[in-house]
Image (tube, coloured by chain):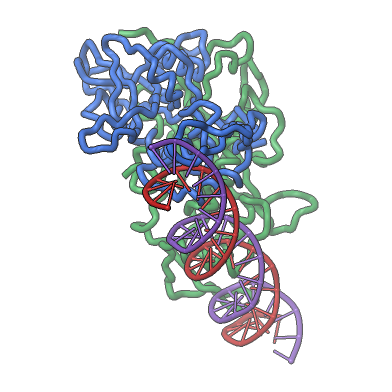
Chain colours: A blue, B green, C red, D purple
Amino acid sequence: MVAPNATLAVSTVIFALRPTDDPGAESRARSLWIPLVRRLRNPFDNFWALPGGPLPAELDLRDAAAKTVEAVLGFAPRYLEQLYAFGDVDRSGTSGERVVSIVYWALVGDAEARRARLGQNVRWLRADRLPTLAFDHNAIVDYALWRLRNKVEYAPLAQAFIDEPFTITQLRKVHEAVLGRRLDPANFRRQLAAAGGLVDTGEHLAGTPHRPPRLYRFDPAAHRIDQGPLAGPGRSPS
Amino acid sequence: MVAPNATLAVSTVIFALRPTDDPGAESRARSLWIPLVRRLRNPFDNFWALPGGPLPAELDLRDAAAKTVEAVLGFAPRYLEQLYAFGDVDRSGTSGERVVSIVYWALVGDAEARRARLGQNVRWLRADRLPTLAFDHNAIVDYALWRLRNKVEYAPLAQAFIDEPFTITQLRKVHEAVLGRRLDPANFRRQLAAAGGLVDTGEHLAGTPHRPPRLYRFDPAAHRIDQGPLAGPGRSPS
DNA sequence: TCAAAAGTGTTGCCGATACACCCATGG
DNA sequence: CCATGGGTGTATCGGCAACACTTTTGA
């Protein structure tokens, strides 16, 4: 038997799509936000930090991350994937004890995030305009953002942000918010159809000022999202 | 201060290219091999396992993985990247204590691997024909193999297996061994040139029974390989 | 009937593949 | 001069981006 040799923490970068809330932006524009927790002790007292904590002995890593999301927002994430393990000796600051953090990233639904009641020391902050965070958390968020922006282009992640049924344009707006650029509606539609898994409900969204768009769902069987090496089938070894 | 809550281990999947050593195969064919360590105690007594051990308090995660390679083979890896953190509660077997393993994967040079003197309880095994290993190590190796085969197609990994200078064909043979399929020599050459970083030494390899092929190097400045979120520049956030 | 979004069609470009072909050397 | 691998050229295919165009609704 070997003695424990470091504190193991699990933290989570939780992404939600929320109104941009910017003086210059359009009123309906949305962007990526992250809930962060204010630290109440040193090191980094009063700095914002990723939610998380020591790994509970009875939980798998993934379950610990899911539990963090529940604790912060009150509901489960729609998507959850391990990001990276950060464990440099000096990452707790010069005087702190050594902590190895296994970081997950999560996506939560639009409607749920709107309803969430955040605790006293929790606040939503824009993912791309963060202040200096505690520890190495700025670098961690940047990496999670990079991963999200990459993966959304080839995996069906965007569906996690919105409810079913949805219109193609709603899904496109999610992609545009994540990627930060406009996408061609015609080509987006074709790519989406080619990827498979899209199911036409036959219904249409009413009340728009223009032609009513079709409403779609995703086929739950097809295109399950890979969330790690043991979650196959998907991109992982079969 | 929080009490340590689990044993943290670092293990490494070390890939080397070695002669296939198969009755049916061509004499010059090569394939992927991994050094494994025989366990000398329960659980999984006498099973083969990935090299590694508890995280030393004074080492970064990456350095711990590099040190494992040194300990097993006697030299440093040419490439090293974090693979995944495995930490399910029951992964140590039903009776074991909980261990969270942060797994790295490494590539080592051809010539160095040939010279390596393995210890008593270490042996090279074919990566794609492994027996049942200890713990969840079969799944880990499969995931590392999947990652290697993916990444070799878009990142300059193959150079890690061979010495400079090299011929295009030598590099192509590495790709073919890793991917397990033939590649078109003409197209491989063009893809490689388009990727950039290839430097013609102006010299030629003599002694072949046919037209002497050109010898190349890689430009060390260009195309540094991304080995994680903090190793930029590369595919990570800049 | 007009504005604007939904949805379809068409074209051109670029990269990858397949494969024809010439080059250079040892035997 | 022949066999063999080194190396270059080229036709074709398919995916993707750009954008023209038609459809459908509310106002």
Q: Residue at x 43, y 75 (%)?
A: B202
Along the line of sight, which residue is nearer the eye, B218 or A56?
A56
Q: Residue at x 50, y 23 (%)?
A: A78
Say which quarter of the image contains residue B217. Answer: bottom left
Along the line of sight, which residue is nearer the eye, B130 or A22?
A22
Image: A5 above or below B210: above
Along the line of sight, which residue is nearer the eye, B236 or A43?
B236
Q: Residue at x 63, y 51 (%)?
A: B179
Say which quarter of the image contains residue A56. Answer: top left
Q: Is residue C8 left or right of residue A20?
A: right
Would residue B149 be seen by someone viewing this image from the given angle? yes
Q: Quadrant for the N terminus of chain B, please.
A: top left
Image: B122 above or below A100: below
Total marks shown come to: 0
Q: Quadrant for the C terminus of chain B, please.
A: top left
Say which quarter of the image contains residue A90. Answer: top left
Image: A87 above or below B196: above
| Residue B118 image position (x, y, % from top left) | 57, 38
Q: Is residue A72 left or right of residue B191?
A: left
Q: Residue at x 56, y 34 (%)?
A: A204
Along the line of sight, which residue is nearer the eye, C14 or A88?
C14
| Residue A47 image position (x, y, % from top left) | 21, 20
